[in-house]
Image (cartoon, rainbow, N blue to C red):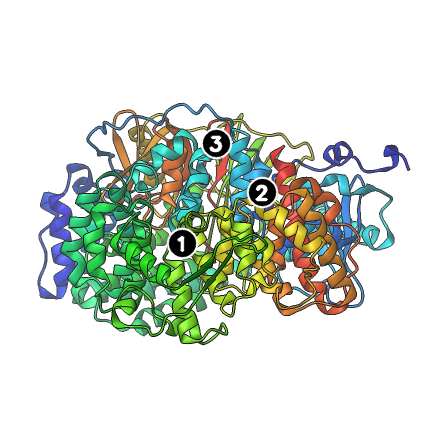
Amino acid sequence: MKSWDNLMNSALLGTGKGPGVFLESCPSEISGLLGAVQTSSEEEKLLVASGALAVWRRAGVRPVRLEPDGDAAAEQETLPPVGPSAASHLRMMLSGTHADVLPEWLDTVRQQGKRIPPELLPALLNHVTSRPDLKLLAIPVMGCRGAWLTRKNAEWACHSTGLEFDAWETGSGPERIEMLGRLHRSDPTRALSLLEAAWPTEAAGMRRQFIDAFQDSVGAGDEAWLERCLDDKSKEVRRSAVESLCRISQSALVLRMQSRAEALIDFKPARLLAKAKLDFRVPEKVDASMIRDGVETKAHTGTKKLGEKAAALMLILAATPPSCWTDKTGMNWDSLVASVEKSEWSLAIYSGWAMAAVRFHCPDLAVALMAQTQECYELVSFDLLVRSVPESVRSGWLIDMMEKKRWKLDSGDMLSALLGALDSFSGCWPDGLAVPVLRQLRSSVEGGKWSWSLIKAMPALAIHVPPAMLASAVLNWKPVEAVEPAVQKFLDILRFRQDVREALK
Amino acid sequence: LTHGNLGTPLGINLVMPAFTVEQILALAPDEASIKAGRGLASPPKWKVLQFSEAAAWGECQGSGKDPYLTSVDFSGPAFKCSCPSRKFPCKHGLGLMLLLVDKSGSFQKSEPPAWVVERLNKRQEAAERKQAKTDHSKYQSPEDLEKKEKARVKRQAGREQNVLAAMDDLDLWLDDLIRQGLAAARERPVRSYESVASRMVDQQAPGLARRVRDCRTLANSGGERADLLLEELGLLRLLSKGYRRAEVLSPELRADLRSTIGWTIQESEVIDQGEKVNDHWSVIGQHLEEVEKIKMQRTWLWGHESKRPAMVLDFAAGTQPLDISLVVGQAFSGEVAFFPSSTPLRASVVGKQDVPFSFDRLSGHAHVAEALDTAAAIIAHNPWLDQVPLGFQECRIRHEGKQWWITDSRNEALPIRPLFRDPWQLAALDGGWGLALFGEWDCRSYLPLSAWTDGRFVNFTTKGGLS
């Protein structure tokens, strides 16, 4: 509006610099009005005109015309929404209270074929951006509206449709890793060439994560490049490269390790009265070629009662496919595990096998190790070993340990291994496992036999109590005073889970 | 033990207005209270949970020896608790209310114990005293009335003089500012505005003081704000000019000038003399802001028969609680008295009947242009109005670059206020299908306060979140 611009210019300069010209350009309605107002000074005249035009401008705002957008509406929802109480629980978890219950909540809603109300979609999408592990649980409960909204926001878009290519150039660290992993699954050659081009300028931490990103889809085509990574400056990059090379069947590294392992074998086949017996020697020395292949013993000699050569044996066995031993000896895993029990190097052998069982996906070996070795919790990477067996096997094993082998929540060397194993379940424990856990927990906190690691683990334990047992699990706790707050917190989670399920009925 | 003795959920729902969890949480003074309240919304934390026709109460074991005694009077809802917290409602009150909504089965029907009876009586007495005060003024002796009237006229004249002096100061300041030019105004130190503002306060014109302080903000931010600054200065000059010839203006416009200056009217006066409208009122939105430690709460009502909005204003200083008797998303039948104005919006709730009903839609305009016409008419009558309530029956949410818009079926749009907390939430509620919105228009941008979509009401007010 020209008259306003004129006024504005005069006002910016100030009337002290001389009278402004503005009345002439005013709309006639305004200039007519202003003509009738008596003013005693140039300042007043300008201000009154500004006031009049201000009203004119403020009352006269017209809509802005936007280009029509071609966007289609979200599809009609087919799932019913959860009720207001359930929505309020979700809001609560997304704002940080009892956030650990969120996976269970999402899963329950998904199973019931319901969806969340639209106003909570942005908060859930933001949450999932920082917790990509929840993505698969979250997508189904977001309904058609969720899919529609996700496409509108680049920050969320990677959840459903896959990242656009430019995420590699411009994305955040996690986005680039995710993008590379995804690309590697569909087009490994392309992924590799992208990575090779960027390699020299990436930091060591990122380089390692990039290798890890396609660990699950690694193939023969990646071998040559991974082999070169064995000469990388960074130890963590080298370690990840070894890990990936072990996943390529018949890779040169695996073959090298296998022949090293075979050179250490000490096998007596079954005779008339004697059972077959397997044992290993430790390598004479650790040479540079072994170190290049990942036999870096330093990381293991400190904490776990292993000498340098024993650690080397462990790492060699860890990179040798376990099938090698069953093939070679014709023995099954139970007898193999039993036969090295007396070995001078049993801890190294068991630990190496444990690592191999995880790496080469050999649950039979894992089960044999878990069930038969006396102090299996001392094995290197025992936590990974436990996670490598199916949950049904794991729970059976845990029940056995807690009921028969006197593994206790009270205290003891195995406590942290036990707590880790109990928390390794993706969802709830089977009833058969929950019973001894709750019984032992109760007797610990009521008998005053508790340790800090147990107290710290209690909230995590509360997440695994099966739904059918929640109602009875909250009743009649009489903890000693010192652990009262921790028990209350534990019970709060159980009660919240009960409320959550009630609200979803 | 039979179920007849227990407070069944049905029993409680009959006596208490139907709140939702979100509505109760909207009463909380801050986020921390929400969290703590939720933690207490668990029956095992309470030694006693009971209710009667008039109230619910409980005993909550805190860190002290004696449990805290918490009660909610349904007629408010009015919270009371023996805990030392200065927050209102405190976490115990919120926890109790949440339990009433979510787990009413945990409450037993009972006769109120002495401490609850005492609280109920106190509230009753206070209400009666208030009533008596109004009644009393009607039955005063003529001499008393005359005396009071004289005192009032004298007070009024005193204030009139003060305000006129404030106007003189304001004019001098405005003229000085414009003589030196707005470019120079940017260079003025903060205290030059502040000293004018505090003089306005001394001269009983707090509304002018607030506007002067706004000018300081506008001047300091420069750029496009220069337009807004000149508008504001011009409107101030119109105000002072209008005030000097108030005698020729209509009483309504005179009232608008006075309220802009900050000349408050006694609520009892409004209730006695203001225009009263009896209707079904929906509480459709709330805006909270805090300026210089004063919390201000605007609560918007919509009359179903009268088809008009009303705004209930409440202030609280420091830790004082704001009024919580109007819960967004609820509705009531009752009488509302409007403050005198050329565009009556501000109102006071005179009588709220205890028959709550729920509302099933938001009224609004079909098109942006039509809504702006309504706004124009209101602004033209009262140019000093800071915000106009606008509802839209069916609008879409659009997002272009960094700017969010509401648009109508003609693709005509209004910008959404950049301060709006979560525009993605609006987009999610829209989903390309459209939604009904209610909010405030300040002649520059639109601030959504609530939405109606898919048969549901959604409230956007957050504690301390906006503005």
The span from disc 1 to disc 3 (Cα, nearest Å) is: 26 Å
On the image, numbered disc 1 is attached to which residue?
B467
Quadrant in which the N terminus of chain B appears: top right
**Left or right of B20 in this view: A288:** left
The span from disc 2 to disc 1 (Cα, nearest Å) is: 54 Å
Q: Chain of mark 2?
A: A
Q: In percent of the image, x 13 and y 55: which residue is there?
A: A197
Q: Is residue B356 above or below residue A412?
A: above
Q: Chain of mark 3?
A: B
On the image, numbered disc 2 is attached to which residue?
A392
Amino acid type, residue under disc 2 in the picture: Ser
**Crowding near the residue tagged with mark 1, few <14, some 14–19, many ≥20 C-alpha atoms within 10 Å:** few
SS state under label 1: loop
| Label 2 in the same subunit as label 1 | no
Amino acid type, residue under disc 3 in the picture: Arg
On the image, numbered disc 3 is attached to which residue?
B308
Q: Position of residue B23 (x, y in %)?
A: 58, 42
Amino acid type, residue under disc 1 in the picture: Ser
A180 vs A35, nearest the viewer: A180
Q: Is residue A397 above or below residue B453?
A: below
SS state under label 2: helix
| Label 3 in the same subunit as label 2 | no
A310 vs B438, nearest the viewer: A310
